[in-house]
Amino acid sequence: MGWNMSESRGRFLMIGESLLLKGWILVALVVVSGCATYRPMPITPETAHAGLISPDMQEVRLRANGFKHPLLKPVPFDDRDGLSPEEAAILAVIANPTLRAVRDRRGIASAQLLQAGILPNPQLSYDLGIPVGGDTQGRVNSFGLGLGWDITSLISRSARLDAAKAHAAAVDLGIAWQEWQVAEAARLHAYRLVIAGQRLVAAKQAEDFFQRLLKDVKQSVALGVKTQLDLSAVETSLQEASSRVLNAQSTVEQERLAFNRALGLPSQRMVPLEKDIAWQLEQCPPAKTLFEDAETKRLDLLALKLGYESQEARVRAAVRSQFPKINLGLTGGRDTDGIQTIGVGVSIDLPFFDRNQGRIAKERASRQQLFDEYTARLFETRADIDRLVAAIKATRQQLAAIDKSLSTGKALFENLSRAADAGQVDIFSYYKAVSAFYDKQVQRIELEQRMIELGIALEIASGRYGLVSKAGHTIQKPGQTTRMEMPK
């Protein structure tokens, strides 16, 4: 039995081709093994409710010590003596669950930055041809092997990276802007809760006054000094005062719920505030100065600028991407005659129809839109600052006028009280004057709240933190509650 050299050579070739194919399969498996794997993340009651658990306050204190923010100033955080408005702002940024979804945008932006820097994969191709007809004597299996890579992506890579970096920075500023708004909302609700408590104190004082007055009138009616008409009048005034107490209690509860929501805490949790919280609205700079500050300090405006820079880079990348796609590669193979070849391959797209004009037009339109959005936001900012400065000026004047009115109220009521005792004034006019005095007290408290709301709104509009501070002019003096100085 003789040795057939051609058959042995054919078997060796088939074995080599089989090993080559298995080798490429092995390479593909190794590459795939380094890829990410899928991990399910279902929404269940347990996983969803876990995000609603309030943070431990000891953990909050530790995180507050290292708190950093472009606008919010760090403050010594200690909730054990009650929260100040500034501490409430820090707690809201740390604990409010609505900010978690906002912060997730940072991960998305980081992923986009990572994707922008990744180069395209090289392309590997392999083909096998087996002679099956015709003159197959002495023929071998043919194969072809190619390795290519798209080098066009290098042209626009730097522009894509610039766009992704600017977008990531804009996202960071956008997150900080929303954190600041949540913090300001917590401060505002803290002040509102204090003022709602003062309104309740004033309502209870008015109710106590009319309760004492009702007791005295009943005794006078029994003695024949007062009439049933007088008794009906004071009973009506007491009913109105009691209704005001109920309304004030409802307002306190609503403000407490709003305060807890701003902090990100459950509604049933009682959050104490510091005692004797005082406030001061700094003398506002000119509106022009505040507007100039807003252009450099408002985080949303800075984020829009970075967003525009990102879009500018996208336009640049789109323009660069209009160049024809170029693919360089190495080729190798063998024909059925056993002749082996190796060479270089180049493929170029011919830009007869698609010159990336659609993407370029889209990116340019998006850039124009961002530019117009920025100018529109500037216009709104300037208008808001002008409106708020004018409103603060008008409210200051109203506060000065009502303070002047209240300063003469005590002497007026003393005269009315003496005149009522002497029967020289209509008792209904007296009760009406008492109710009017209460209304002025409440009006002043409401003006105080409006000043705080305007001050915090001006902080947001101008990007200048601290216009509303803790020291200076106080809503109430330390250790003293708001009192209605009713006549004895």
Image (tube, rainbow, N blue to C red):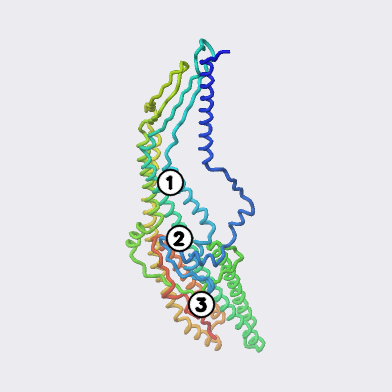
Between the C-alphas of marks 3 and 1, the distance is: 64 Å
Quick one: quadrant of the C terminus? bottom right
Which of the two labelled residues, at mark 3 and mark 1, occupies the earlier sequence position? Answer: 1
Callout 2 crowding tier (Cα within 10 Å): few <14, some 14–19, many ≥20: many
Report the Cα–Cα distance between label 2 and label 1: 25 Å
Q: Which residue is mark 2?
A: 180
Q: Which residue is mark 1?
A: 113
Q: Nearer the viewer, residue 470 or 253?
A: 470
Q: Residue at x 45, y 43 (%)?
A: 115
Left-right relation of 446 to 380? right
Q: Is residue 366 visible?
A: yes
Instruction: Using the image, determine if residue 266 lies above or below residue 397.
Output: above
- Tell me the tag on residue 437: 3
Name the outermost residue toward the top.
135
Q: Residue 252: which quarter of the image?
A: bottom right
- Indicate which disc, 2 or 1, sits on the residue closer to the N terminus: 1
Point out residue 247 in the picture as x, y percentages from the top left corner: 58, 69
Give percent across and percent down for residue 100.
Answer: 52, 55
Kind of residue indicated by mark 3: Phe
Residue 195 can be seen, yes or no:
no
Please tell me which residue lies in front, 103 or 41. Answer: 41
Q: Within 10 Å of the Cα at label 3, are there few (<14), some (14-19), or many (20+) other Cα atoms? A: many
Residue 2, relative to residue 98: is it above or below? above
Would residue 83 be found to the left or right of residue 269 on screen? left
Q: What quarter of the picture does the N terminus occupy?
A: top right
Q: Secondary structure at mark 2?
A: helix
| Kind of residue sitting beneath label 1 | Leu
Looking at the rendered structure, the kind of residue marked 2 is Trp
Note whether 107 is above or below 321 in the view shown.
Answer: below
Residue 213: x %, y % from top left: 60, 83
